[in-house]
Image (cartoon, helix red, strand yellow):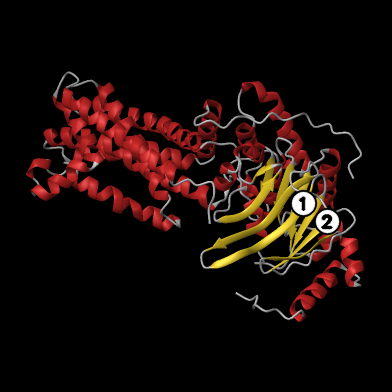
């Protein structure tokens, strides 16, 4: 049948390892490139936390102490919520558009995909948190005893946790409607129990026990440590490690929901 | 088993043969309560275009997904390019196009291809080859003038061609195309079939192309006719027509369906 000589160069099959730096970077660049075609989403992600902090500052105009504690907590909560929403919708779209099936039929490791997403949204979270923290500290007179860098670190870990949770729940959502409903289901209970509204040790013991196993509680605790102490306390290190550990655990669970073979 | 194996002149390839691209023995796929593929035995020869034809819902897409390695609950033997289907080394050697275009609507045509090329051939060292590959794939599907348009702004036919271009990246040895010409105008369909023949001849690739439009069958070297999860015939278009004394492949297909029904099935074939 085929008589003409082949001009195709011999293709060397690239090895599929657990994590490939170029594939991870290519994925992160692709996710950011997609966002770049959607400037309105970027603007909303970056500006809404700033607007909310601004609003909050003048809501608590008469009690700057309250603004200090709530403002610092919110600096950790905003990136978590934003990244949760963005990641759950983005990965759901990846699943429903068939691009996920296509990618998993290619030599892309699951770790590459997840790390790519985490890297892209992590970058965005850094920008978001830096702006929000800068605004709070220098323009809204948020009174923080510790280093702003530690605030930023917790915010970044929270963003990672949000990405992880979003990735994980997207596996259980069949549509965008369902994905958005996971926000009140997964995020709101944590919001109520994290100590934002009332100190956790004032809650009913049963609720306090629940709040002890929810990662957002440690994110808020960590922020409060920075608020009240000049140095990096042991409690802060513990809180940061717990948030980071939860993020990695949930990322691992998220990876398990990506299947090369589906029914 | 409802297999009418019309062994013809070009047939008779053994498993593991260098001339065999896909070899299946007793291939069965179960999806939920349904058995979608029922103990298929067939062979797809290398370097040719094999058409997979049959009505909607007969199991064509499931068979293609099994070959590509994305289908769960596959039993029996299924070897692709000498390895079991789904083997990691096959991931760079197979190009696969799903029925619905699977591309990123919020990226341009070129950005889509750049990303998938970066997955197939990662690293700075292959940057030049990637660029060449992407440019060629865009030209292959005749989208050069739309290279910088967002995929989401293209027409349905153009988007499915972007999806096809992704599968052409990296010079795959086996192309599995699920209804690639659906919804395209006649001129474009002819151009694409010419491209498929060029790919088979010049790039020495194997193509497995599904369609529910019988007139496309005439353009294939070999045909697998499917119905209700079984293979009705595995032959060349000419041999099929001759054997069934039919003018067209469509008439041959209907003849085979009637023949199978008349043969007095012991088991009911309906689900």
Q: Is residue A247 left or right of residue B126?
A: left
Tell me the residue at 39%/29% (across/down).
A127
Q: Residues within 10 Å of mark 1 (few under 14, many from 20)?
A: many
Give the structural element (helix, strand or loop) at label 1. Answer: strand
Quarter of the image where one finds residue A47? top left
Query: In the image, what residue occupies the spot 44% across and 31% down?
Result: A119
Disc nearest the viewer among 2 and 1: 1
| Image-based side of B77 in relation to B72, left or right | right
Asked if marks 2 and 1 touch (Cβ < 8 Å), the reply is: yes
Q: Is residue A242 above or below residue A147?
A: below
Residue A232 lies in what quarter of the image?
top left
Which circle marks residue B44 in the picture?
Answer: 1
Whole-angstrom CA distance, mark 2 to mark 1, is: 8 Å
| Mark 2 Cα shell of 10 Å, populated few (<14), some (14-19), many (≥20) | many
Could you say which is closer to the camera, residue A144 or residue A215? A215
Q: Residue B117: where, in percent of width, then height?
A: 65, 34
Q: Is residue B266 visible?
A: yes
Q: The residue marked by circle 2 belongs to what chain?
A: B
Residue A80 in the image, given as x and y percentages of width and height:
32, 39
**Residue A15, which numbered label?**
none
Q: Position of residue B198 (x, y in %)?
A: 85, 43
Q: x and y percent of residue A28 in the render? A: 50, 33
State the mark number for residue B222. Answer: 2
């Amino acid at each position: 049948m085929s008589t003409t000589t082949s001009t195709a160069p011999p293709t060397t099959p690239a090895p599929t390892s657990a994590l490939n730096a170029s594939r991870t970077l290519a994925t992160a660049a692709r996710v950011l490139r997609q966002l770049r075609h959607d400037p309105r989403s970027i603007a909303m992600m970056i500006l809404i936390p700033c607007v909310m902090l601004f609003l909050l500052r003048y809501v608590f105009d008469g009690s700057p102490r309250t603004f200090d504690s709530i403002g610092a907590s919110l600096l950790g909560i905003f990136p978590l919520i934003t990244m949760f929403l963005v990641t759950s919708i983005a990965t759901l779209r990846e699943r429903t558009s068939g691009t996920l099936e296509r990618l998993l039929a290619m030599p892309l490791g699951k770790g590459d995909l997840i790390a790519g997403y985490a890297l892209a949204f992590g970058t965005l979270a850094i920008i978001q948190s830096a702006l929000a923290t800068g605004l709070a500290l220098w323009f809204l007179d948020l009174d923080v005893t510790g280093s702003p860098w530690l605030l930023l670190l917790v915010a970044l870990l929270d963003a990672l946790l949000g990405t992880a949770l979003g990735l994980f729940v997207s596996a259980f959502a069949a549509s965008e409607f369902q994905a958005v409903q996971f926000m009140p289901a997964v995020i709101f209970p944590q919001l109520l129990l994290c100590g934002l509204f009332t100190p956790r040790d004032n809650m009913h013991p049963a609720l306090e026990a629940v709040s002890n196993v929810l990662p957002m509680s440690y994110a808020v605790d960590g922020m409060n440590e920075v608020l009240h102490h000049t140095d990096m306390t042991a409690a802060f290190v513990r809180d940061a490690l717990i948030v980071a550990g939860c993020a990695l655990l949930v990322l691992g669970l998220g990876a398990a929901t990506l299947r090369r073979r589906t029914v | 088993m409802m297999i009418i194996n019309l062994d013809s002149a070009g047939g008779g390839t053994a498993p593991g043969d260098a001339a065999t691209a896909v070899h299946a023995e007793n291939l069965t796929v179960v999806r939920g309560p349904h058995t979608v593929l029922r103990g298929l035995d067939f062979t797809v020869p290398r370097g040719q275009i094999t058409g997979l034809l049959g009505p909607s819902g007969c199991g064509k897409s499931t068979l293609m997904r099994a070959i590509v390695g994305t289908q769960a609950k596959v039993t029996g033997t299924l070897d692709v390019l000498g390895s079991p289907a789904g083997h990691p080394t096959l991931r760079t050697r197979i190009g696969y196009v799903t029925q619905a275009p699977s591309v990123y609507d919020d990226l341009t045509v070129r950005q889509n291809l750049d990303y998938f090329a970066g997955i197939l051939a990662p690293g700075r060292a292959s940057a030049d080859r990637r660029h060449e590959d992407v440019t060629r794939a865009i030209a292959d599907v005749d989208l050069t003038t739309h290279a910088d348009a967002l995929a989401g702004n293209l027409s349905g036919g153009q988007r499915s061609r972007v999806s096809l271009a992704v599968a052409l990246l990296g010079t795959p040895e086996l192309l599995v195309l699920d209804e690639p010409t659906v919804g395209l105008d006649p001129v474009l369909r002819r151009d694409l079939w010419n491209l498929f023949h060029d790919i088979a001849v010049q790039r020495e690739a194997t193509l497995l192309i599904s369609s529910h439009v019988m007139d496309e069958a005439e353009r294939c070297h070999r045909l697998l006719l499917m119905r209700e999860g079984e293979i009705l015939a595995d032959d060349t278009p000419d041999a099929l027509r001759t054997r069934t004394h039919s003018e067209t492949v469509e008439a041959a297909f209907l003849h085979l369906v009637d023949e199978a029904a008349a043969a007095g099935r012991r088991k009911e074939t309906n689900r």
